[in-house]
Image (tube, rainbow, N blue to C red):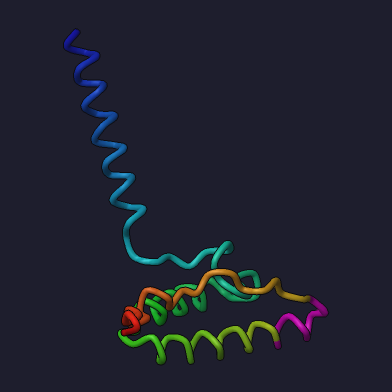
Amino acid sequence: MRTSTIGLIATIILLWANDLAAAGPWRASEQNTSGWMLMSPDERIEHQAKIRSFAKYDDCHTYQIAHHRLMRERAARLGLTLPESGRDACAHLRPPSSPEN
């Protein structure tokens, strides 16, 4: 009985810690970063830090557009086509929409 209780508590703690990690800061990855495979490991780290550093949507979005352009240029030089970007990494900085009156 005692062993199963400890196991249950450990499982709950692990699941809780996993939820906290998932809610953490944005992490650049192959699934969410245009041109990931065309970037060096140092560029990937720098890109993630840069995206995280923005406090204003417009600044973040301007950087994001420039990054996408650079990655498309690199891909074109290699004869590759990048998939269209899906998620807006800067979306969390958008000001909330005001209700129309």
Q: Is residue 28 left or right of residue 36?
A: left
User: Where residue 94 appears, x then y in whole percent?
Assistant: 37, 81
Q: Is residue 79 magenta?
A: yes
Q: Is residue 46 left or right of residue 13?
A: right
Residue 53 seen in the current view: no
Q: Residue drawn 57% across and 75% down?
A: 40
Quadrant of the image for the C terminus? bottom left
User: Where residue 57 appears, x then y in whole percent?
Assistant: 38, 86
Q: Is residue 66 left or right of residue 27?
A: right
- Which region is colored magenta? 73-80
Q: Quadrant of residue 48?
A: bottom left
User: Where residue 35 appears, x then y in whole percent?
Assistant: 63, 75
SS assignment for the magenta stretch, majority: helix
Establish if 68 lies above or below 37.
below
Q: Residue drawn 63% across and 88% down?
A: 70
Q: Residue drawn 40% across and 82% down?
A: 50
* Nearer to us in this view, 41 or 74: 74
Establish if 1 lies above or below 87.
above
